[in-house]
Image (tube, rainbow, N blue to C red):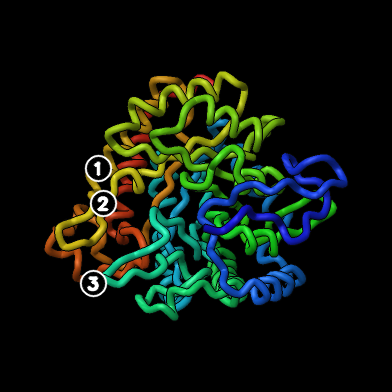
Amino acid sequence: MPGPFVPPDPGPLVPGSGEAGAAPRPRPAAQQPDWPDRAALRAVTEELAVLPGLVLAEECDRLTERLAAVARGEAVLLQGGDCAETFDGVTEEHVRATFGTLAEMRALITEGARLPVVQLGRIAGQYAKPRSSPFETRSGETLPAYRGDLVNGLAFTLLSRAPDARRLHLGYRVSATTLNLLRALAARGDGEFWTSHEALVLEYEWALTRETPSGRYDLSAHLLWIGERTRQLDGAHLDFVAGIRNPVAVKLGPTTTADEALAIVDQLDPDRTPGRLTFISRMGADAVRDRLPELVSKVEASGARVVWMCDPMHGNTFVMPSGHKTRDLDRIVDEVQGFFDVHAGLGTHPGGLHVEMTGEPVSECLGGSRPVTPEDVPSRYESACDPRLNQRQSLDLARVVAKLYAHRPPSRR
């Protein structure tokens, strides 16, 4: 297992990293690659550290303003895109399809909610994935798990699965190409479009962090989130995002306690700034109505003004007899309904939706208005990691969400 992560150049004091002028205290960094060539890693991160950021600090600040409106109940947040982007998958057709489907979803939700919708993509950087096991076994052979194209390759060979630091530079270049196309599409009148990814590989995130007159920003994306597997209160991931001015998000699963959620607020949003912090609930359809109310009520009572989002994907995944991971749209809808039920009961604002989706006609998830059956699933299963809603299923879900917003009770904030 890799040891504690220490940033290559700590620079000015980062909240939680020790006294001013002191070296940052090492914190355990979960889910990090075991890089075999540390010299290559150092060379790549030093090169990335002097390249232009992929986004601008002022863009991150504008997104914080938009998210503040969501936190106040004056807007809705829609976040979607691939589970794991791949370098080979970044074609113009794919990017256009994802952008276009999100735009259609936004239009449907806008009509139902009668509120502006902030459009945030899991795109232009979603190249790293946490894994439940560091290894994968097939036909008696055990190799390192695929951790996303930022780290290693999907092909089940020893050469492909070896972490390669040169992929960090390739991830930067492909993200820049994707952003160029996204900006061109948004400029055609489709509205603002923001990018996000999981801040997982900390060497990459630190290399793209810049000091600006306004403070420190991670310029790899507009918003960074911390996942369920890396949100340890004493861990390096929360410590990292505590020290940047980007809007940030944290995923909360069914084991999250109210005390943990409040501690995350204190660490990441001590000034209680609307728009700074988003909590992404990923409870599962069976747990959302039982586990979410205490978290929402106690965080709201603390004076925090976070954005509450629903990720109905990750808690509803199962493996078919064929070995394919899948999700059923009916279960996804049930969790979304439960999320709205919780907020209706508490008088709080259901801030938005976080989904793994694509604009292409894949067959990775079950159900929908043009149903994908278990027999259909293997026919177009193209995800590098977890199953995504296809275009039609994404729009089916957006219509459900639009109706839920249209009939929601007014917030008591």
Snapshot quadrant of residue 170: bottom right
- Asked which secondary structure carries label 2, the reply is strand
Q: Amino acid at mark 2?
A: Arg
Depth check: 32 or 213 in front? 32
Image position of 225 (left or right of 332): right
Residue at the image position 36 percent from the left and 47 percent from the top: 314
Do tag 3 and tag 1 residues touch (Cβ < 8 Å)? no
Neighbourhood count class around disc 1 (C-alpha, 10 Å): few under 14, some 14–19, many 20 upward: many
Residue at the image position 32 percent from the left and 32 percent from the top: 287
Neighbourhood count class around disc 3 (C-alpha, 10 Å): few under 14, some 14–19, many 20 upward: few
The percent coordinates of residue 371 (x first, y second) are: 17, 56
Q: Amino acid at mark 3?
A: Ser
The percent coordinates of residue 169 (x first, y second) are: 62, 75
Residue carrying label 2: 327
Q: Amino acid at mark 1?
A: Arg
Neighbourhood count class around disc 2 (C-alpha, 10 Å): few under 14, some 14–19, many 20 upward: many
The percent coordinates of residue 303 (x first, y second) are: 62, 22
Do tag 2 and tag 3 residues touch (Cβ < 8 Å)? no
Do tag 2 and tag 1 residues touch (Cβ < 8 Å)? yes
